[in-house]
Image (tube, rainbow, N blue to C red):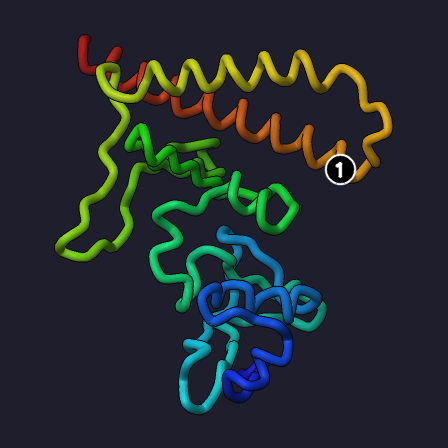
Amino acid sequence: MCILNFWGQGALQNFGICNRKPFSFYSIVSMQVNHDNGRINTENDSMYEREGLKVRASKDINAGDQIYATYDKCVDCMSIADIFGTSEILKDFGFVEDYPHRYVYMDQDIWFEIHNEDAGLTVHWDQRNVDDDDELYPEVTEESGLEFLKEELSRIHDAAARLLNKQGDIPDREWDTIYNYYMAVSVDLHTVIKAVKDTYAHEEL
């Protein structure tokens, strides 16, 4: 089933879309297609296809169901998944995404996702499909990356203690977004830190 069909790059350019940032296409259809990497129910061709960009249902969609796509794993997003995560979604689109959450700390060589599964929150290390010249980010260990994540969690808590004690003139919606982001990051960092500790505690038994 074809949901949306935009013909040619000329039509996209009329909406102010920059070819160097093709993922901005979703600003056109933000009222029809929302981001949720955990509930994607569409698929699409490249916006550079000769016949134009087509978005199709990837599974059954009932009348009244929300239509979901991805803002950072799309066909034309190039390697943005290498560097784009929950924090970048907030920065560029203004909302805290639902699970799964992704965190990329490039300078520390850390990449992981937190998924909300039946068993609870689980940690997923880098499992992207990469080119032969690229490498996956390594798993965090007690010797590599764990101390940074502890420091990052401490930094987040310190910032919240200073900045989240009074709303002031910040509009309710913005305040809620800030608080939701703080909660997401603090819970997710705690989850990954505990997972690493539990792994090494189990290996020492």
Q: List x then y, in percent, for residue 87.
A: 52, 39
Image quadrant in which the N terminus is located: bottom right
Disc 1 residue crowd, few under 14, some 14–19, many 20+, Cα 10 Å: few
Residue 3 shows in the view? no
Kind of residue at badge 1: Glu
Tell whether 68 sits left or right of 200: right
Identify the residue at the far bottom of this view: 51
Residue 186's image quarter? Answer: top right
Residue 112's image quarter? Answer: top left
Residue 61 shows in the view? yes
Residue at 61%, 51% (x, y): give it. 93
Image quadrant in which the C terminus is located: top left
Q: Is residue 69 above or below residue 60?
A: above
Residue at 13%, 55% (x, y): give it. 132
Identify the residue at the far right of this view: 169
Tell whether 154 sits left or right of 124: right
Number of labelled discs? 1
Tell whether 22 sits left or right of 108: right
In this view, the residue in front, 44 or 123, is: 44
Q: List x then y, in percent, for residue 74.
A: 43, 63
Residue at 57%, 78% (x, y): give it. 13
In this view, the residue in front, 91 or 53, is: 91
Residue denoted by label 1:
174
Q: List x then y, in percent, for residue 76.
A: 41, 68
